[in-house]
Amino acid sequence: MLERARAAGASQAEVSCDETAGLAVNVRLGDVETVEATRDRGVAITVYFGQRKGSASSADLREESLDATLAQACAIARHTEEDPAAGLADADLMATTLREFDSWHPAPFDADRAIDIALACEAAGRGTDVRITNSDGASINVNASLSVYANSHGFLGSERSTSSSIGCALIAGAGEAMQRDGWYSVALAQGDLESPEAIGRKAAQRTLERLAPRQLPTGQVPVLFAAEMARSLIGSFLSAVSGGALYRRASFLLDSAGSRIFPDWFSIEEDPFLTRGFRSASFDGEGVATRRSMLVDGGILQRYLLDSYSARKLGLASTGNAGGVHNLAVAANAGDLSDMCRTMGQGLLVTELIGQGVNAITGDYSRGAAGFWVENGVITYPVDGITIAGNLKDMFATIEAVGNDVDPRSHVRTGSILVGRMTVAGTG
């Protein structure tokens, strides 16, 4: 495809080829609801005629279809306005060392076995307690993917990975007193998953803990985000320092590189080379070499998250983040969730967030929430029907602690996060 693009007159070109295969099974109340097998492949090409860009893709890999795809990309480029920021990433940024990260663990897996695992997971949860009265089902997903990227700088790289997940969601109580919760496990290798029975029982435990919730009066209190919810706070920060938001001037953290955003003990490190990391890679989506570096150090934002296009728009250099961040680790300065509750003393532990409610331009934050009230450092009762609100700039600056209770189910690895004070809107 690159050779054909050159022959068509393109000054630069890049091609990506992908193939994925997967199996997904869903069961509910002991019956199989869906079994879905997928197998997809495709090729995408982007051509540049000077600073005019055109892209096209196809799932049909016959020769005539590839020719037609290239012709479409060239036609788009020829009719597109020039963009000074368009073009491949700089040639001297291309990765020269390609590594494996132990992310490829294929294993035989048929529908019958997947069904048995999902049924066992749900049965374990439903059998935990008579107060578990219904189920939203259990599911299992297994996937394998291979991708190859090449460009006219001479770069050629491939990546492959597998992933598996098991999840269960249950319902406890009856009528208007019903509560729902669940649990899941995800890993690159099937052997690293929690057992189906353990997942089902944990889903049941989390659901039962939410029975008989209360509401809270409106006021300002400390808020402790459980680890799986704390990821969303870090996600809001990542969105605000991404190149696309910055050059569009749609971020509350404009011109913040080199500024203190978090407390002076707070840090976030990006490590693309983590063995079995969910987002480990030697190169980003443009072939740029990734590197291990600090994103936040001593509370200070060290850099933005840039691909080549956003970097040029901002007059900066690519940070190797085309396609997103790689493995992030938020450094802890406290113990586990119990320790964090004791540190907080009195306040709200958030275990569920509802809705989006984040203004990317102002940083205003308002989301529905549910969780538990903590009194004298101990969880006392569940709460729901509340809204938590603040401004992300203030929230980041007033983070008091990060726990060591890291949730390992994501490429953003963080423990629970304690924010010193937020507005909780409840019954009045």
Image (cartoon, rainbow, N blue to C red):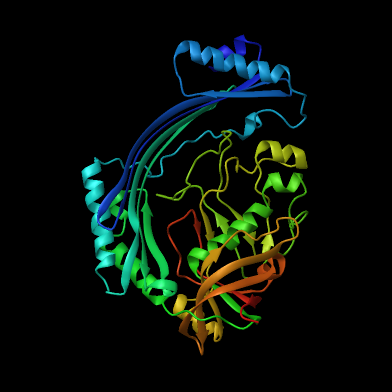
* Residue 421 seen anywhere in this rendered image of the structure: no
149 relative position to 135: left or right: right
Rendered residue at 36%/35% (across/down)? 38
Residue with the most extreme bottom position? 376
Would you place residue 213 above or below residue 277 in this image?
below
Quadrant of the rendered image containing residue 423:
bottom right
42 relative position to 45: left or right: left
Residue with the most extreme front position? 175
- Return the x and y of residue 135 as percentages of the image width and height: 34, 62
Rendered residue at 49%/10% (across/down)? 64
| Quadrant, the C terminus | bottom right
Would you place residue 204 above or below residue 303 in this image?
below
In this view, the residue in front, 352 or 398, is 352
In this view, the residue in front, 87 or 33, is 33
Rendered residue at 30%/50% (across/down)? 190
- Return the x and y of residue 371 as percentages of the image width and height: 50, 74
* Residue 52 seen anywhere in this rendered image of the structure: yes
Would you place residue 56 above or below residue 106 in this image?
above
147 relative position to 289: left or right: left
Q: Count up the numbered dots.
A: 0
- Return the x and y of residue 207 as percentages of the image width and height: 38, 71
Rendered residue at 66%/44% (across/down)? 306
- Return the x and y of residue 408 as percentages of the image width and height: 43, 60
79 relative position to 162: left or right: right
